[in-house]
């Protein structure tokens, strides 16, 4: 449905119509629509919200219907999910006779906010608020429902309600915990509801959790969730590389959350993290051919981790498709007299500012090149503000308006350069973002990265692969004074900027029949070649490494 907005396709639209007709036939008389519980467990509806994803699936269905309505104007799918949402509203809540439950896997909360925007029906917004407000209250609903099934809550495999972010009421939470994807969907919904209800306490909680995440629990790729055991978080600074989970859906969820925080508080930190997650932890989830997918995105591999055509739990492939098809909504934002540019991507967007039509067009080869050109088409001369994000990784950004350089304040407002003036048709803004190669260091408490650096150019994190260096990448190290140079290679991985430099490597041949021996090690010069992390595992199988030894 998202793809139909930018790329109308009659065949695809007809396929969707056929699917919607099929769902309408499957929908029960009371509005219920979950094929598993209709066919396999017809007498077990709503009996295990903690583990069975009824409300999660309903949320995705609602989001799909809203996207379809926006794309086509057809309301059959929308009316179908409204019947389902009405049933859910009649089933859950604090009123007598209703279940005081909420989903084990969050998602329906943000979907109900979208349904409210599509229909204007505030009851959907109130239901979303109920699900968020009720979460983590006592007595704990998941314990009550377990006992009703004849189970002992102590036998819960996760052993803690942190797994479902229901260990505390949401306004009392300060740390991202549990299953990473579930958390991002909850935190995104908290930001949505904070905006709708002007709820400072809810936004404060979302901000606290955000700050803890980006300061102590996020990978440099924008990946989140370090453990396979719970598909989520462990403790602060526990960011192993080879065993990193960093689920693709978690990076996508982080993008959704960051976008909502950005609407409430237009600060660079949110857009920088959004960009980091987009270009690294998310794009790595899909092959360059677009037909195989990562579920997990480690930062080191011994050559045994590869994308697959599909996954048993198939959330990541369609989530990537959804994100990329709807990418346009994350590039810009506007209010009464300001237009923000958050991401630098070739695009066009139209806005109504003070009753006049304004069109912005970006032309750029970012992130490979440093220039971004923004052209304006304005219905009539109009005074308003254009705000451009100045990425944190760029030490010396430059801006020219109609060829004239603008002086930037030492500390632009929240990381955005704001240009307030009367804009005319044909005006042009040129932005120049210097892209030095940064040797990034990790916090000393991230033990996996002690004595190592990661390479970053622009928004891209880089890695080295066996395809360019042979085996045993951990034996390669960079000297602090080693010069690194970027070079665009049109024939490499679809056209990327690679990073070249001189490095040293222990000579493996000296260890043919020895496990231990006294030093010093025999080393030899080698050429380092790093490629963007998102493009790894697109050549022959082999090792991969993000964090390189340095001395």
Image: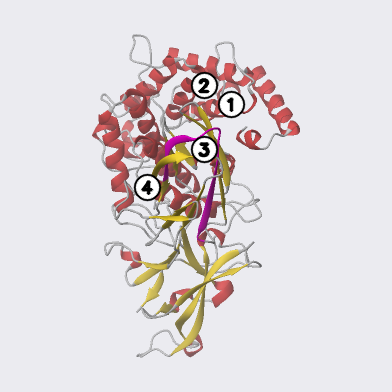
Please report the bounds of the magenta region as a residue range: 370-387
The reply to whether dot 1 and dot 2 touch (C-beta < 8 Å) is yes
Of mark 1 and mark 2, the one earlier in the sequence is 1
Q: Is residue 144 visible?
A: no
Question: Is residue 381 highlighted in magenta?
Answer: yes
State the CA–CA distance, disc 2 to disc 3.
Answer: 16 Å
Quadrant containing the C terminus is bottom left
- Identify the residue under disc 1: 70
The quadrant where residue 128 appears: top left
Residue 53, x across and y down, in percent: 48, 30
- Identify the residue under disc 4: 416
Question: Could you tell me what secondary structure mostly forms the magenta stretch?
Answer: strand
Question: Is residue 264 highlighted in magenta?
Answer: no
Residue 81, x across and y down, in percent: 55, 20
Residue at 47%, 81% (x, y): give it. Answer: 502
- Identify the residue under disc 2: 118
Residue 484, x across and y down, in percent: 46, 75
């Amino acid at each position: 449905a998202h793809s139909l907005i930018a790329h109308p396709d009659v065949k695809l639209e007809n396929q969707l119509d056929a699917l919607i007709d099929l769902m309408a036939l499957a929908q029960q008389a009371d509005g219920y629509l979950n094929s598993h519980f209709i066919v396999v467990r017809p007498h077990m509806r709503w009996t295990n919200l903690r583990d069975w994803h009824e409300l999660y699936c309903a949320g995705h269905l609602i989001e799909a219907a809203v996207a379809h309505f926006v794309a086509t104007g057809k309301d059959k799918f929308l009316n179908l999910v409204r019947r389902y949402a009405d049933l859910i509203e009649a089933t859950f809540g604090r009123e007598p006779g209703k279940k005081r439950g909420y989903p084990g896997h969050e998602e329906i909360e943000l979907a109900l906010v979208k349904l409210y925007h599509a229909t204007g029906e505030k009851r959907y917004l109130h239901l979303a608020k109920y699900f968020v407000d009720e979460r983590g209250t006592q007595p704990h609903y998941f314990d009550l429902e377990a006992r009703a099934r004849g189970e002992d809550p102590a036998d819960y495999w996760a052993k803690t309600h942190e797994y479902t972010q229901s260990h505390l009421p949401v306004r009392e939470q300060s740390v991202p915990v549990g299953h990473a994807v579930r958390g991002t969907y909850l935190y995104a919904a908290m930001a949505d509801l904070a905006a709708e209800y002007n709820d400072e306490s809810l936004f404060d909680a979302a901000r606290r959790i955000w700050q803890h995440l980006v300061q102590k629990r996020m990978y440099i790729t924008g990946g989140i969730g370090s453990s396979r055991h719970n598909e989520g978080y462990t403790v602060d600074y526990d960011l192993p590389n080879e065993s990193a989970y960093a689920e693709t859906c978690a990076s996508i969820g982080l993008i959704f959350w960051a976008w909502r925080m950005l609407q409430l508080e237009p600060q660079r930190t949110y857009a920088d993290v959004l960009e980091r997650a987009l270009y690294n932890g998310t794009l790595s989830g899909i092959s360059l051919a677009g037909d195989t997918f990562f579920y997990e995105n480690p930062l080191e591999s011994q050559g045994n981790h590869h994308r697959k055509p599909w996954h048993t739990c198939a959330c990541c492939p369609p989530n990537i498709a959804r994100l990329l098809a709807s990418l346009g909504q994350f590039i810009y934002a506007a209010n009464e007299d300001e237009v923000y540019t958050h991401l630098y991507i070739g695009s066009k967007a139209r806005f109504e500012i003070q009753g006049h039509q304004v069109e912005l067009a970006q032309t750029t080869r970012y992130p490979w090149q440093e220039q971004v050109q923004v052209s304006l088409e304005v219905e009539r001369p109009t005074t308003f503000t254009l705000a451009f994000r100045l990425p944190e990784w760029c030490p010396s950004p430059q801006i020219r308006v109609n060829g004239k350089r603008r002086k930037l304040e030492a500390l632009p407002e929240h990381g955005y350069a704001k240009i307030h003036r009367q804009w005319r048709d044909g005006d042009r803004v040129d932005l120049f973002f210097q892209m030095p190669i940064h040797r990034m260091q990790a916090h000393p408490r991230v033990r996996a990265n002690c004595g190592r650096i990661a390479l970053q150019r622009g928004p891209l994190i880089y890695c080295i692969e066996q395809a360019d260096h042979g085996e045993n990448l951990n034996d390669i190290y960079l000297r602090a004074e080693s010069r690194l140079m970027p070079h665009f290679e049109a024939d490499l991985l679809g056209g990327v900027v690679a990073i070249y430099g001189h490095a040293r490597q222990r000579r493996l041949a000296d260890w043919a029949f020895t496990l231990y021996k006294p030093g010093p090690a025999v080393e030899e010069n080698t050429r380092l070649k790093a490629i963007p992390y998102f493009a790894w595992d697109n050549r022959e199988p082999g090792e991969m490494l993000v964090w390189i030894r340095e001395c």
